[in-house]
């Protein structure tokens, strides 16, 4: 891809609202998508995403994430768990669930 592409998450292509547990905004840029999620205490895959994903038991996607603030716990289907905190960078394979840890919102970038 030649040149420069620029998008702003203040003007998203897509938005998801997780009822009382936060929101996510995404933009398409080139062949990729970038998402900013603001996940409030109480947010979890099971409660907030699973119903939107047709009842899948775990997320089928790979995520590249940067945690801006707060903390979030990921559990893989094999039982492996990681708690990510501010300034952590992660690659999370398919077959995971997640939930916000603590009483602070978790803000992260996902691409």
Image (cartoon, rainbow, N blue to C red):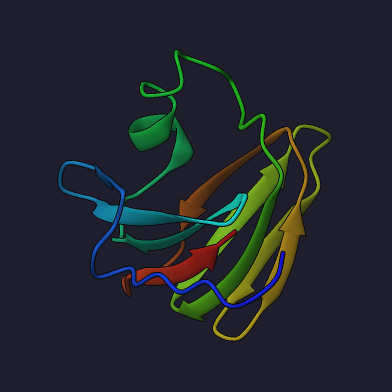
Answer with the quarter of the image where residue 47 lies. top left
Q: Residue at 67% of width from left, 29% of height from top?
A: 60
On-image quarter of the C terminus:
bottom right
Q: Residue at 32% of width from left, 56% of height from top?
A: 25
Please say if 37 is above or below 94: below
Q: Position of residue 83 (x, y in %)?
A: 64, 66
Q: Residue at 62% of width from left, 65% of height from top?
A: 65
Q: Residue at 64% of width from left, 52% of height from top?
A: 74
Please say if 102 is above or below 51: below
Q: Nearer the viewer, residue 89 or 85?
A: 89
Answer with the quarter of the image where residue 58 lies. top right
Position of 59 with respect to 9 (left or right) is right
Residue located farthest toward the left when viewing the structure as drawn: 20
Q: Position of residue 71 (x, y in %)?
A: 50, 71
Position of 62 with respect to 44 (left or right) is right
Q: Position of residue 92 (x, y in %)?
A: 73, 52
Please say if 75 is above or below 58: below
On-image quarter of the N terminus:
bottom right
Q: Position of residue 53 (x, y in %)?
A: 46, 22
């Amino acid at each position: 891809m030649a040149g420069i592409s620029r998008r702003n998450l203040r003007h998203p292509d897509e938005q998801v609202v997780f009822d009382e547990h936060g929101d996510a905004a995404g933009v398409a840029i080139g062949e990729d998508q970038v998402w900013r999620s603001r996940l409030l205490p109480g947010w979890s895959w099971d409660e907030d995403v699973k119903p939107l994903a047709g009842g899948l038991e775990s997320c089928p996607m790979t995520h590249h994430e940067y945690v801006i603030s707060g903390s979030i716990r990921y559990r893989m289907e094999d039982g492996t768990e990681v708690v990510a905190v501010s300034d952590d960078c992660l690659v999370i394979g398919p077959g995971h669930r997640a939930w916000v840890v603590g009483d602070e919102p978790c803000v992260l970038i996902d691409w």
